[in-house]
Every structure is written in C-alpha cells, then in structure tokens.
Image (spheres, rainbow, N blue to C red):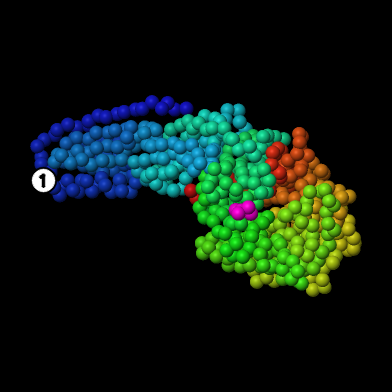
Amino acid sequence: MKSLKTYLFLFPLLFAIGMISCSEESSDCSLAVQSVRTPVDEGELLLEITDDNENYLLDFENKSVKLSKKLIENITIDSVRWKSTISFVDGTDYIVPTLGRSLESLITSITINPSGYNPLAAEALMNLPALGRIKVTVHSKENSSVPDVEYFFSSIEKKPRDHNLGLYPSYNNQVTLIYTDKQGNERASSTIQVKTNSLNNIFLPKNLNIVKADINKMEPGMTLVNSVGESGQDTAVPYMFDADGKIRWVLDWQNHPELNHVGIGLGLRRMKNGNYAAGDANNGQIVEVNILGELVNSWKTSDFGFSVHHDISVTPDQKILIAATKTDAKIADNSDVRIMDHIAELDPILGSVTNLWNLAQILDSSRIVFSPVPEGEGYNDNNNKPQTKMNWCHNSGVTESADGSILISSRWQGFAKFTRAGNLKWIVSPHNAWKKQYEKYLLTPLDRNGNPITDPDVLNGKKTHPDFDWGWGIHCPIEMPNGHIMCFDNGYCRLYNFVDAEKYSRVVEYEIDEQAMTIRQVWEYGKERGISCFSSHVSSVQYLEQTNNRLYCPGMNNQLSTGYGGRVVEINPQTGEVVFEAEVHTTGFPAFYRANRISLYPEGL
C-alpha cells in the first residue's frame, strides 16, 4: 500500500522581472489569461512549465500555451493541492489546476455505510481539480481465489461521490482509487484503507459452504440472494456473496423508518438507472431502492386495486410486470374471491398501471385437477393454499418475451404465453381436463428425435417419458436468447401425487415451435440430485450470458452436508459439469426465494 505521507512542494519559478505595468498592456494580460483559461475550461490539467528565456511554455494534457515573461511576476506550483498560481505584474493571480502526486489531499471524507442500510459500502467524497473519472478497485483478501472488484465510473465530475462496493465485513479493506481524465487516461492513484464492522443481522446465513468453485469456468459477478429474513412475513435481507462464500454486499433495513418490515424476498430486479425494483408483499407496494438501500420511490398497490405476490419483473422499456391479486375478483358464482390470477403492468415514470390482465379470461379457471395436499405437509398457509376455485391458478412467475408477449407460470396450470391484447398463444401443461376451446393451444411434446409423443399417460401427466416431462409447481419462467424457455420445475405434486411421486426439482429447457405447436425438452439438470436438491416451493433459474452456463437455485429444504437450506449450482450444459456450487445454511425459512448471478456495480454510474 502507498504511504499516506503528505508531500508539499512550493517553489517559485521566477521572481520580479521588471517594472512593466499590466495597465500598460491590459489587452495582452487579458489575452494571456484567456489562453490559459481555454484548456482549463476544457478540463485539462497543467503538466509542466518550461522557460525559453522570453516565454513560459505551459504544457497541458492536450495542448500548450505560451505566455510572455513580461506579463508575469512569478509562478508557484503546489503539487499537494494540485494547483499552480500565476501572479501577474499588476498583482492579480490566476489559479491553474495542475497534475499532483497523490489523491489523499483530494479526498474530503470517507464514510462507512453512508445510507445506514448497506454496511459493506463506503462513500469517498472528493474535490477534484478538473473534470475526470474515478476507477475503484476493492482488493481481494490475501490468498483469495476471487478477482478484485473493479469499477470504472462513467460519470465525469469535479466532486464525485465514489461508492466503494464489495467490502469485506470486519476487515481493513484495501481500496485503490484511480483518477483519470475524461478519456480514461490515468492521472494519479492512491490506495486507502477502509475498515468495516461485523454484520449483525441474525438472519444472514451462518455458513455459506462452497462445495466447488472453478473460477475460470464460472460466470463473472457475485451471487445475489433474495433472502426473506426469518420468514416470508419478516424483513427481507438481500445480500451478495462471492465465489469464496464471503458476503460482500447486503441491504439491512432493520432501522429504516419505512422499510423495516419490507417483504421483498420476491427478488430485486435491476433497472436501467442502476436501482432495484421489488415487490413488497408485506406492505402492499412496489418499491424502488438504490444500491445503498435508500428508498427512491414507492407505489401502493392498493391504490390500483390489487396486491402483489410471488414475482415482479422489469421489461426492456422499464415497465414493471407484477403478479397480482385483484381485490374485487370473484369466482364464477360470486360466492368467493379469486387470488393470484392477475398480471399488472406499472409505468414507474407515470406512476400508473398501463395494463391489467385477468388470467381467468385467458386460461381455464374451471380446471381443478390437483387434490388437496395432506394435512401436516405445511403447505396450506395463506400463500400456499391447495387448488380450489379461488386458487385455481396460483400464478408464480411473470416476464416479457422478446416479441413483447407475456410469459407466466402457474403452480396448477403449467406455463403459458399470451399477447398484450390478452390473446392466448400456447399452453405448456398436461392435456387432461382442459375445455375444448383450449385444446388448440396445448403444445404437443416431441421425443429427442423430433417425433410426437402419443402415449396418453404422458400427455395427461400420469407418467414421464424418457425424453420429456411436464413441469410441476413451476417458478421463474424465462425466455433465453435462442428463444428457448427455461424454468424451475419444483416437482410439486409431480404426476398429480405429492406423497408417493419421486421428489426432485430440476432446471429444464424447452424448445417451442409456435408454428407447429410442439415442445421438445432439450436439457435438464437436477433429477440426478434427487431429494438433496428438492425444493417444493420458491426457487429460480438463470441463463448466464457470458459463459452460456445455467444457474439452478433450489431455495428451501435441501438436504445439505449439515442441516437444511438452499443451493446455488452453476452448470455447463454442454458438458454437464458443475462449475460452482454453494450451500446456503440459514436460520430463516426458506433460505431464499430467488438467487441470481449479477455484477456488483450496475452499468452507467
């Protein structure tokens, strides 16, 4: 680490040089000042001053300025304070921003946990002599297998608020700050120490056991865990951990006046502005928070006549899709309410709902095919009711596909795609018990050779095929860049049998031909893991763009090496190799609702 010793260089370049009055050559003095001001106004630093006997040559980063010695009394350079002072013969001074030696003198303050809600963040305020950018490097611990955390801020400022993310808890972190010009050319750097405190939230995992981490084969970034806290009704505690299993980012709202009971275990969704959108089921709202955990905006869903549950997602045009329960929705005979069968679209700019889709008008709300879960299984709480007329759908995921259609999953009805006009495109579900008008939307499964599977027991979900199975209790449907659909198949009531069916959860990838109305299973993982990765509820999958790997995240009741919890598993689908696996032991239940690999810093800061 560089020393924090202060350097001070004050020296005159030239003393009195004559009795020339600037009043006699006022126009020349004015032009001299203007010639220097031009590169200064363009954000350049002075690098060097040379003397050719008659003139001073001021070399800036991209241009040079010549000043007549007749107009100048003297020049002093202060390398510590990054400035030079030109004193003219009439007694006036002009300050020129000048390349210095160390950034320490430019740092006005360093604050740990500046928001009060992100204990592994620090904010360095700086007073820069000229417009420029800052690059931050948070150095990994000695003998760590993970690379340093680096981010090059795109903003060009003179007084930046540099956010240092990815600090280790209870550690004297080494952070290098690099100051560059507007084009990114380095001017100077310094390494500072940032001492953090220990984490005190009791619902953070006591142990993140890294089973395997092949850094060279893994998707870069950190794993964002959308932890629910103690339970789904408690304060959520989202956090990120690195490939060593060290927590490096956390939002702790225990003392937040508005978010101290926030239920956003449904998952943080990064927006284009770098903030996160999330559904707060505890307080019936959609919230927008920044990387430090500060509340930026919120929208009460009751103002729009619905509540939020299970999932939200952010569309490419920054609308927010919401899995919703419409408060005045009733079953067909008006004898009871309906739950978890609407999709809302919120425009956060307008603060209004731009679309509201009633799934009972798109799918068959009379299709009741699952028998109640046996008593004592623990799945009949408010959010996990058995299938009834009121809970005919149990929508568990929503996202937008590339063509602008809406993709949703349902615990009881499989998953489906419909247009923004509400027109059904297809249904992925066992074929039994659908009314005739829906049969044309049911996709026909193919075997690995592309031949239709015709066995009625497979079509109707009574048995699996060696090349194909339907999803059961599905979460987290996503459309991949190649158009395939990937989802987390929980295996809940697989083959319509919760008690006796084989218990496993899998990530499964399907190829769908919308013209031929067929579906082919092209890849799966998890069946071979059996009960050790079985998660009847919650959980997620992710397509990893840089490596083409897949992230498989069963979030509860996994049988771990010691105890129970969730897993985060990264698989190379071409080789079947697990390149990363972490066991998430936690005092909360479930261990997490969603998990995904993400860059620590959002782009565009």
Position of 139 compared to 264: left or right?
left
x and y percent of residue 74 in the render?
A: 19, 35
x and y percent of residue 572 in the render?
A: 72, 45
Q: Residue at x 30, y 45 (%)?
A: 40
Label 1: which secondary element: loop
* Residue 537 seen by the camera: yes
- Pointer 1 residue: 23
Give the magenta-colored segment's residue range.
278-283
Please tell me whether residue 336 is drawn above or below residue 169 in the rendered image. Answer: below
Residue 518 is one of the magenta-drawn residues: no
Q: Residue furthest bottom?
A: 437
Given residues 203 and 450, the one toward you in this image is 203
Residue 282 is one of the magenta-drawn residues: yes
Q: Total number of numbered labels?
A: 1
Please tell me whether residue 205 is drawn above or below residue 301 in the rendered image. Answer: above
Given residues 322 and 425, the one toward you in this image is 322
* Residue 150 seen by the camera: no
Position of 304 compared to 375: left or right?
left
Q: Residue at x 85, y 52 (%)?
A: 374
Q: Residue at x 86, y 54 (%)?
A: 497
